[in-house]
Amino acid sequence: MQAWFRRFLCAGLLAVAAPTAASAAALLIAVEDDWPPYSVRGADGAAQGLAPQLAREAFRRQGVAVRFVSVPFARCLMLARVGRAAGCLSATITDDNRSQFWWHPTPMFTEELAIFAYASSKTGLGMRDLAKRRVGITQDYTYPSAFMNDPNIIKSVANSDDDLIRMLLARRVDYVLMNTLPGQLRIRGNPSAGRVRKVGRISQDGFWLAFSKAKPKGKERAEQFEAGLRSMRRDGSYARLLKTFQTPPAGK
């Protein structure tokens, strides 16, 4: 595990127990395995991060036991879409996926979608500045529909956010899109960190637990999760949990 992520573990990052015979009846939720600090696969294979911790507590308050499987994001969505998992953590709502899942009204959290570039690039950029430029994005991630449908932006697809940084450093793209805090953490753990910085933003996006429509109780589960999430907001535990995970790394 990279050193930049250890402080989040020390700050209270709790592993979610792997499936056992006793938990076989628990609600199975798929979670992305490589998006710190929101979700990451631990050394023992268990899901760690804000998203699984928040989901577990919200459902606990509704008397629902959950277990998690850590997978790449594309597989996370697939497992929820076909009903092999009750839902997928954590997805944004776009024009393309809006009708594919059940969504709870309140997002779990919000994150900025930022533009990263060489440190020498000008700042204050927005989507209009990406026209005719090579922009790196991560395969199967959910980006705003306005960005994805803009034919003037030349999109280059990478397998991961780490690959995006490598593409940028190799000058294969002009810019890359990453969520701000996850992007800053990855840059912090890269030997070439000083050569890359945030130079603009695209949007501020909500993230949800996307519930399967292939499951008979999918809508009911979304309602239960919403009730648990609202309970956490009322007693302050939600704000405390977000503060633990969303504190920006020093110097960023």
Image (cartoon, grey):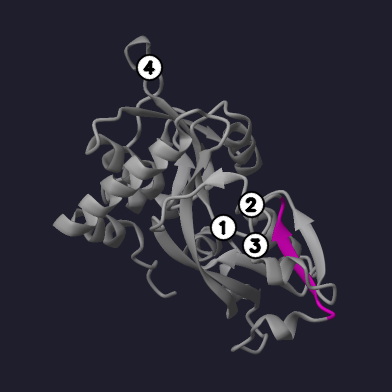
User: Which residue position is annotated with label 3?
Assistant: 143
Residue 238 falls in which quadrant of the image?
bottom left
User: Which residue position is annotated with label 1?
Assistant: 93
Front residue of 37/105: it is 105
Between the residue at mark 4 and the residue at mark 2, the CA separation in whole angstroms equals 28 Å
Percent of width and height locating residue 41: 48, 37
The circle on residue 250 is none
Which sits earlier in the primary sequence, circle 3 or circle 1?
Answer: 1
Between the residue at mark 2 and the residue at mark 3, the CA separation in whole angstroms equals 11 Å
Q: Would residue 48 be seen by someone viewing this image from the given angle?
A: no
- Dots 3 and 1: beta carbons under 8 Å? no
Asked if residue 133 lies in the magenta stretch, the reply is yes
User: Which residue position is annotated with label 2?
Assistant: 97
Which sits earlier in the primary sequence, circle 2 or circle 3?
Answer: 2
Between the residue at mark 1 and the residue at mark 4, the CA separation in whole angstroms equals 29 Å
Q: Which residues are magenta?
A: 132-139
Question: Which residue is found at the position 50% from the left and 60% from the top?
Answer: 182
- Dots 3 and 4: beta carbons under 8 Å? no
Question: Which residue is found at the position 54% from the left and 59% from the top?
Answer: 186
